[in-house]
Structure formats: structure tokens, C-alpha cells
Amino acid sequence: MASSNTEIAHEFPPFFRVFKDGRVERLMIPHDPPPLHPKPGVEYKDVVISSETGVSARVFFPKIDGPDQKLPLLIHYHGGGFCAGSPFDSVTHNYLTSLVAAANLIAVSVDYRLAPEHPLPIAYDDSWAALQWISSHANGSGPEPLFNNHVDFGRVFLVGESAGANIAQHVAVRAGVTGLGGVKPVGLILAHPFFVGKEPDKMIEFLYPSCSRVNDDPKLNPNVDPNLSKMGCERVLVFVAEKDWLKSRGVGYCETLGKIGWTGAVELMENEGEDHCFHLFNSDSEKAEMLMKRTVSFINQE
């Protein structure tokens, strides 16, 4: 009989497996991670959001042109099925470096804690706490001087891909319901969002053990959220990919926004012939560049 440290209790490829002794092995960590691709004029720094929880973030910023320059702020939540990914990995780092260079903005990517070691809804709570911490700089007296001095808090955008898009959507609704001390996000950008459907999702059920019915949880399924019409932003841009099995859920989300009385503007863009989050892994492709240009245009439109 296999010992408990080698016998598998749960396995959810391509994300992780759990052994009977409780050890978690992640399956998506490359042996030779791709290199970071620096962009001229773009720098980054890491900040601690909560010393109590260990939540941190990576901040990306362009060259600042004088002490009074104010730039838009993009708040990013990474994908990875709530159990993988990081602001510090090369995929997120390279994408946000390129976006900062293209849009001339400040971006912050939140390192929320990952399940299953930190079960859902911890990722949502960490992400909301990060948004509150960022908003604490709006009066110019927060702990991070870059935010105090150079962020235009009238131009704040929430963005995420896959599970990160789910989180971004949730915190946008939460901001509309509870407020952020005068800071109201202008826009929400969701790339190939992960929302649960009607069918069972065994991995999400495992990651969210305190939830009896994940399909009916408004964080995972915004179509059943009674507060969706109160979402705290003015514009939403949703990207879906033709070959992505999640495409119908992104389309359905846009349709729901049009039915419930939300007063903002919603735009849907389909990436034809592409699969889930292709723009992160094939960033030099023509269609990835089109997605980037549309994102920049959405951010910079008046």
C-alpha cells in the first residue's frame, strides 16, 4: 500500500493534485520559466498591502514627467483558476509591462492568496482589501508615495483574465454597493472571464468548501447576483475567444447586464480563431496586438 505522502486524494489537471497527507503539488510551474521582457521606460516595484495576511502586489509604472503628472490606474487580478498564477510570474509581468508602455498608465497586480491552501472566498476578500488599500491613497496620505503623487483617482480601471476577471467583476460590484471613500472605478475589462455555469464544477467545489451550491453563489455566477445592477463603474469591455469553452458565459454575462437595468455601457469583442487567454501566451500575434490596442483605446477614451 502506498504511503500517505505519495497517495493522491484529489487531482485537478492541469492545476494541482492533493495528497492524502494534505500536501499540494501544483502542476503548472514550468521548470524553465520564460524570461522577463523589459520595456524601455517601464519600471516596477513590489509593495506590501497587508503584513497580517501577507498580501502584496507588483506596481508597474512609466517614466514620470514632473512632480504634478497624474496617470490612470489599472488594478489587475491575475487568472489561474483561483489556485495558480502570480503578479510576479513572467506571463503577468510581461503583459502588464507592455500595457503600461502602450497606455502610459500605472498598473498594480494583486497577489491574492491561492486556494486550496487558502480556500475561497479568501481570494475575493484579499482582492477587496487590496482595492481598499489602493483607494486609501485618494486623499494623498496613503503609504505608497507613487499612488499619492501620480495616480488620477478619477481614472481607475479594474481588469482581469479568466478567474481574475471573475474577481475584478466581483470587486466592481462590491465597490458599487459599499463605496470606496469617493473613488469610483471608471471601467471594467474582462478577458475570457471564468464564471460558473449550470453544470457541476468539481474543482471549484473543492476550492470553496464552505459554499453548498457554487452555481448559485453570486461571486462565481454574477447572473444570479441581486446587486449586479449596482456595479460601480460606467463602462465594461468583455473579450471572449471563439474556441474558448467559457465563451458562452462571457456572452451571457453581457446579455445579463443589458437586461437588469445597469445604466453603464457594455461592449463585447470576440477573438476569432483563438482559445482561452491566448494573448498572454502568444503576445506577439496579430490578434493579441489587436486585443492590446482595444484595451488601450478603452482606457484612454474620454
Image (cartoon, grey):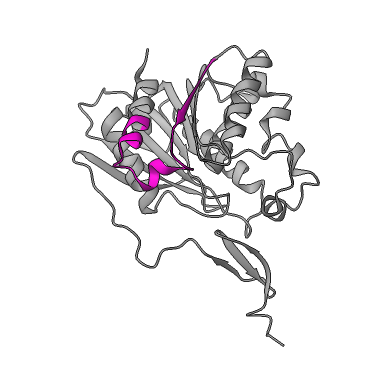
From the viewer's side, name the closer residue of 181 and 255: 255
From the viewer's side, name the closer residue of 50 and 206: 206
- Does 275 lie within the magenta span? yes
Q: Is residue 241 above or below residue 51?
A: above
From the viewer's side, name the closer residue of 95 and 291: 291
User: Please, which residue is most extreme toward the right here?
Assistant: 212
- Does 44 lie within the magenta span? no
Label tally: 0
Q: Is residue 266 above or below residue 200?
A: above
Magenta-colored span: 265-291
The reply to whether residue 280 is visible in this rendering is yes
The reply to whether residue 46 is visible in this rendering is no
Q: Residue 143, how many percent across, how many down? A: 42, 38
From the image, which quarter does the C terminus lie in? top left
User: Please, which residue is most extreme toward the front here?
Assistant: 273
Q: Is residue 185 above or below residue 26?
A: above
Q: In the rendered view, does 295 fall on the left or right side of 176?
A: left
User: Please, which residue is most extreme toward the bottom here?
Assistant: 1
The residue located at (67%, 39%) in the rendering is 220
Q: Quadrant of residue 71?
A: top left
Q: Residue 139, how many percent across, how many down? A: 44, 24
Q: Residue 207, how many percent across, how many down? A: 67, 54
Q: Quadrant of residue 273?
A: top left
Q: Residue 45, how many percent across, how many down? A: 33, 46
From the image, which quarter does the N terminus lie in? bottom right
Q: Is residue 44 above or below residue 261?
A: below
Q: In the rendered view, does 263 fall on the left or right side of 109?
A: right
Q: In the rendered view, does 197 fall on the left or right side of 142?
A: right
